Image (cartoon, rainbow, N blue to C red):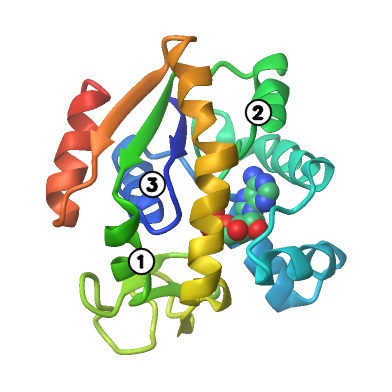
Amino acid sequence: MNLIILAPPGAGKGTQAEMLSKHFNIPTISTGAMLRHNIDEGTELGEIAKKFIDDGKFVPDDVMIKMVKERLRQPDCKNGFILDGFPRNINQAETLTASKLKIDAVLTLDVSDEEIIRRVSGRLECSECGTAFHKEYRKPAVEGVCDNCGGTIKTRKDDKPETVKERLNTYHAITEPLKKYFEERGLLKTVVGREGIEDTSREVLRVLGE
Ligand code: AMP
């Protein structure tokens, strides 16, 4: 199962990707988490990405395409993968379409901007493995410690309200047109994001025919 998740920041993409990863036993390739990990580790890629991310801007396509191609070549992607955060614009989508990879479905989560701004304010993330948590909706068992890997849980620097608004504007202008792009290719599956994580997960599995 080769899947793409396409949704605005804060719609629950990371959480649903994690559920699907367990369900299908395939890895999630979260470009945002990969970039943040590189920033934390102080790699060359992290240096390049940092100034774009902190401003809520996109990291250049050539950097992203190289990073994703290398990741998808890893043996754990042989039986499928979930792309979370890529493609983010038409150029990235066309690069993917031009590659030999067959995409089975593109899942989109619809959540209103108001709801996103409300949710993002409580968002947390493991700085090691990228697992998503939330101060209200998804608390870790031990405060500040990741349930998954024991890593440190932090708020994201790009989750400040001004930056979130900027990222939402970018999403509507540049990423949302990808819905039409994939709909025309018969791949789009839409789920209206619910309040509860489990309700959304059930709906996600239903639209994927599971
Ligand atoms: P995310 O965690 O998916 O919200 O990504 C956080 C930030 O990483 C974005 O606001 C971008 O600056 C950058 N980023 C992640 N994926 C991409 C991509 N496919 N193309 C360009 N920039 C990206």
**Residue under the image location 37 percent in, 31 percent down:** 107
Between marks 3 and 1 in the image, the one whose residue lies nearer the viewer:
1
User: Looking at this view, is 91 or 147 the one in front?
Assistant: 91
**Dot 2: element:** helix
**Residue under the image location 22 percent in, 32 percent down:** 205
The earlier-in-sequence mark between 2 and 3 is: 3
Q: Quadrant of ligand 1?
A: bottom right
Q: What is the quadrant of the N terminus in the image? A: top left
The earlier-in-sequence mark between 2 and 1 is: 2
Residue beneath disc 3: 17
Check disc 1 and give the amino acid type. Answer: Ile
Where's residue 201, x and y in %? Answer: 20, 44
**Residue 90 disc label:** 2
Residue 147 appears in the picture as rendered: yes
Check disc 3 and give the amino acid type. Answer: Ala
Where's residue 7, x and y in %? Answer: 42, 43
Horizontal arrangement in the rendering, residue 76 relative to residue 207 (left or right): right
Q: Is residue 122 above or below residue 112?
A: below
